[in-house]
Amino acid sequence: MNAQGPDISLWQDKNSTPQMFDPWKARAKGASFVGIKTSQGSWADPDYAQNWARCRPVLYRMPYHFLTWDISVRRQAELFWSLLERDTFGLLPLTCDFEWWRTVPTRAMDLLYGFMERLKTLASPLPMQIYTAKTFWDPNGSKSDYWKQYHLWLCDIVGLVEIPKPWTAWTFHQYTFKLPGLEWGAESLDLDGNYYNGTLEQMKARFNLPELDAPVVAPEPVSGLRMRVIGSGLRVREAPSLDAAVVDYLGQGQVVDVQEVVTTDSWAKLGERRYATILSAGKPYLEKV
């Protein structure tokens, strides 16, 4: 059976609710990986930090950048890598999304080439990939063997998969835009679905993937938990990640109500977009009251 997984971005989240993508629901549906939009042009996807941290222990992660024509491709590659380089655990190919956006320039391929060359300089030897559709690649890409060094994430939802040259096989295949989102852990009704060209074990071997941190069964949410700040103070961040923006500070000895313990028991969710680390690099920052 092919390994499978959805891909997600800010469009799967309702900003009016605190709920985020639930990787456990996707895993329960049979997902072993997830494509996560990291950036587009010169900006980071607003949900990237939370999606990246929440999925880390549960699903293998495949980051992608949406290439635009209005920003230096060197700058785009550097932004993409800057968001990833601190956490490359369980990483599938770094992907450039090469598709329709506004008016496509005549030499769009040159922009893609510049992006991928800069990304190679920054992130090699990590595997890299191009997401595209045959209907876009044929008029805008190239049949040069140069492109075969990259994996192909092929968008083709019409049934029989037709592979654009110079590739002879796809590594990942986006086969639908219509997964039932609510069942797969998203707030949007429709969700993209993808296959890996092989089994989960074959995917793990091909990309030298470690075992995931999380147990097979989702942990029960913690409720009624109170914790006290240890030390001189503690930053509250908008996502369970040390890279997320700081939104508040907690003083020494301050007691807080914890809604949920997330990300392999390392973070306490205190409210909507409010997270504090419980344990980092072996050092405790919160203790149970």
Image (spheres, rainbow, N blue to C red):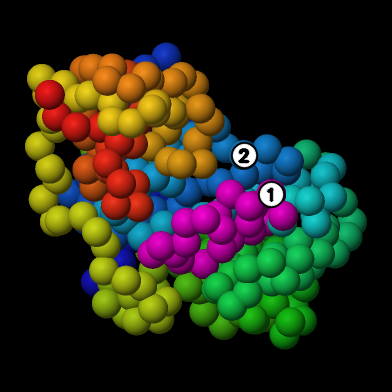
Going 59% across and 68% down the picture, which residue do you hit?
Answer: 129
| Range shown magenta | 78-101
Can you see residue 5? no
Image-quadrant location for residue 210 = bottom left
Contact? badges 1 and 2 (CB < 8 Å): yes
Q: How many marks?
A: 2
Considering depth in this image, is 255 or 272 the residue closer to the camera?
Answer: 255
Identify the disc placed on residue 177: none
Considering depth in this image, is 192 or 275 the residue closer to the camera?
Answer: 275
Identify the disc placed on residue 79: 1
Can you see residue 253? yes
- Residue 88 colored in magenta in the image: yes
Give, as a three-letter code, the residue at label 1: Leu
- Residue 261 colored in magenta in the image: no
State the image coordinates of residue 192 (x, y, percent, origin top left).
42, 47
- Per the model, the C-alpha gap separating discs 1 and 2 is 8 Å
Q: Is residue 111 above or below residue 223?
A: below
Residue positioned most to the top: 16
Q: Is residue 93 above or below residue 281?
A: below
Give, as a three-letter code, the residue at label 2: Ala
Q: How many residues crowd around disc 1 within 10 Å: few (fewer than 14), some, or many (20 or more)?
A: many
Residue positioned most to the front: 232
Q: Which residue carries the number 2 mark?
A: 44
Considering depth in this image, is 59 or 223 the residue closer to the camera?
Answer: 223
Considering depth in this image, is 265 or 104 the residue closer to the camera?
Answer: 265
State the image coordinates of residue 33 (x, y, percent, origin top left).
35, 58
Quarter of the rendering occupied by the N terminus: bottom left
Helix, strand or loop at mark 2: strand
In the displayed structure image, the side of residue 64 where residue 190 appears, left or right: left
Image-quadrant location for residue 149 = bottom right
Going 66% across and 43% down the picture, which residue do you hit?
Answer: 40
Quarter of the rendering occupied by the C terminus: top left
